[in-house]
Image (cartoon, coloured by chain):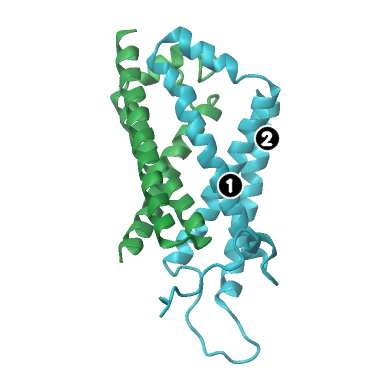
Amino acid sequence: MRDQKLWTWHLAAGVIILFLLGLHMAIMHLDALLGIFNPAGGHPIDWANVVARGQSLAFTTTYILLLGTALFHGLYGLRNILFELDPAPPLKKALSWVLILVGVGLFIFGTWAAWVGYQVASQA
Amino acid sequence: MEKDRGHPNRLGIWGWIGGGSWGPDRYLYTLHRITGLGLLFYFVVHIFVTSSRAIGQSAWEESMMRVTGPLFVLGEYLVFVAVAFHAINGVRLVFAELGLGIGKPIEPIYPYRTCLDDQRPWAIGALLLIVALVVVGALDFFVWH
């Protein structure tokens, strides 16, 4: 039952990622069409454009949402692959905990970076 | 008495590519996993590389300098291809999970049909869309820029 719920969340996270990552890829690679997100011109990763996007609380929120959903989707997918190799139950438990700790650690670090990045951009 | 553990994956990783007389769907499954693992690795690296934004302009520009050059452009393109495949094939899998596009249950009467026969046009459509994106992506990465 628990795995069924986690699997449903895994699929739901995939749908959210589809939209947010699609937007991210479009901004980064269709800059000729979506110049509105790169007001300074040039390349989307130029500092002026990074600051312009970083000043937006909406962008910062979507970064954090994408971070969380992608980490869950990716690490739960990895867990499924590892579990299919049929490790012993204690190893399964240890793997789950390692993946949870890695996921939470990366989420905290990424959220910190996104939030401080927002503050840095707002002061620029 | 040993606890019944169901039917474990006896073939392990080998089963991804050499599990028997698998059809094209099995190779889509394998590619879905390979692209998923590749994207997870890239994503973790991406978190660390882009976190330099929090330190300031010089740190950001320094870290971006470290990931420039033809090899990184090629790598970035491969990430784009992996995203295109994983996303579109993932949509197909979500539809199948929800019972869409796999037909209704039927009597097993010869000549036998499976849900894979009903799914095949979706799989072919997904592959065509992936190929179109891969071509547009190649133009964007290597021609238009």
> How far across and down, in percent of the image, does residue B41 sit?
53, 38
Mark 2 secondary-structure assignment? helix
Q: Residues within 10 Å of mark 2 (few under 14, many from 20)?
A: some
The residue most toward the front is B1
> How far across and down, in percent of the image, does residue A25 sit?
51, 34
2 or 1: mark nearer the eye? 1
Q: Quadrant of the N terminus of chain A?
A: bottom left
Q: Which residue is mark 2?
A: B138
> How far across and down, in percent of the image, does residue B23 sit?
67, 68
Given residues A48 and B23, the one toward you in this image is B23
Mark 1 secondary-structure assignment? helix
Q: From the viewer's perspective, tell me whether residue A63 is left or right of residue B65.
A: left
| Residue type, numbered disc 1 | Thr
Q: From the viewer's perspective, tell me whether residue A47 is left or right of residue A105.
A: right
Q: Residues within 10 Å of mark 1 (few under 14, many from 20)?
A: many
Residue shown at 58% from the left, 47% from the top: B35
* Mark 2 to mark 1 CA distance (whole Å): 18 Å
Q: Quadrant of residue A107?
A: top left
Do discs 2 and 1 share a chain? yes
> How far across and down, in percent of the image, does residue B9 sit?
55, 67
Q: Is residue A83 above or below residue A22?
A: below
Residue shown at 43% from the left, 55% from the top: A91
Q: Earlier in the sequence, mark 2 or mark 1?
A: 1
Q: Is residue B137 above or below residue A45?
A: below
Judging by colour alone, the chain drawn in green in this rendered image is: A
Q: Chain of mark 2?
A: B
Can the viewer see residue B71? yes
Q: Is residue A92 above or below residue B80?
A: below
| Residue type, numbered disc 2 | Ala
Q: Which mark is residue B35?
A: 1
Residue shown at 55% from the left, 29% from the top: A29
Q: Which mark is residue A27?
A: none
